Image (spheres, rainbow, N blue to C red):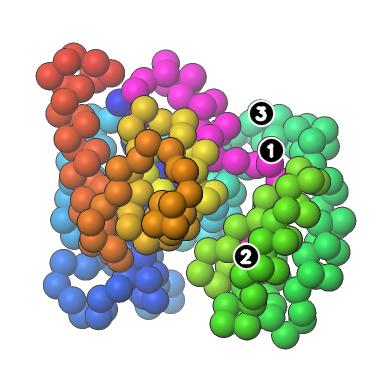
Amino acid sequence: MIYASDLDRTLIYSRNAIGVPEDSPGLVPAEIINGITVSYISERALSQLISLAGNIVFMPVTTRTVEQYKRINLFQETVIPDYAVTSNGGNILIDGKVDMEWRTSVGKRLELHSAPAEEIRTIVRSALRDEWILTERYCDGLFFTFVVQRDLLPLNVVSQLADKLNDLGWKASLQGRKLYAVPEAVNKSAAIEHVRRTVQNEPMVASGDSLLDKCLLDAADYAIAPCHGEIFAEHQEGFRVGVYSFTTCSGVFASDEILQYVRTIYNNLGVLGVGLP
């Protein structure tokens, strides 16, 4: 069985996203920078993940760059996956090294199907006022991340920008204080399907919270989302979403329910003798 999961706000949570005080019991540091914990995982979820990881193919799937992924201590020291998808699907890591064959194929699809990055940057900068933007980054030569003043940024501006980018082969997604502009060719599901073929197309469970994760969840046989984030917001507003399960708990402890869901699927498949060693 494969378990492919988004990381931030799904399995691991920044200090601002945990939803409980930092000194709450049951939290374990996931990412430490210069001696400071910057993200956490639930202790119970981590225990479940460690228990499962030896029997399944666990794949982190993240919009983080390669560099940002590698600074997550949890996945460098405690649970070390054979495969990881970073850069929103633009890069696949195999035993910690970038799969250059995949990266080259992504570059070719970008040239064919998406407008040039500089054109997109110009459109975004013209749509957003300078005072709304705190920082801008072109990530791994693939997509843009804009850290914005969320309380100043009108949602209708984001919606109009998303429509404009769609016509040019790009997508916009607002997650917390980060506005992403991502080419359609750079997506999590394409990368996951590539790895899935490599590991002989095992049954797959997926989890994620944002609109950038929808294609990942749609590609899975079983999918779950936390009851926070863009996917849950669409569900609450009555938009049609995929056949997903949702947690009852929000914040960092949603990961407890997510890993219990994965464990239940694993056990059920074991009874059926499907997709297990």
Task: Give the numbered dot on residue 179.
Answer: 2
Query: Which residues make up the magenta segment?
Result: 180-204
Residue 119 visible: yes
Q: Which of marks 1 and 2 is nearer the N terminus?
A: 2
Q: Position of residue 102 (x, y in %)?
A: 64, 31
Left or right, 16 with reference to 150 = left
Left or right, 132 with reference to 255 = right
Q: Say what amino acid the circle numbered 2 marks.
A: Leu
Q: Calculate the distance from the C-alpha at mark 1 to the C-alpha at mark 2.
A: 18 Å
Q: Which circle, 3 or 1, is nearer the viewer?
A: 1
- Residue corresponding to mark 3: 101
Whether 187 is among the magenta residues is yes
Dot 3, how many residues are within 10 Å of its Cα: few (below 14), some (14-19), or many (20+)?
few
Q: Which of marks 2 and 3 is nearer the N terminus?
A: 3
Dot 1, how many residues are within 10 Å of its Cα: few (below 14), some (14-19), or many (20+)?
many
Task: Return the residue nearer the eye: 69 or 26.
Answer: 26
Locate the N terminus and report the quarter of the image it occupies.
top left
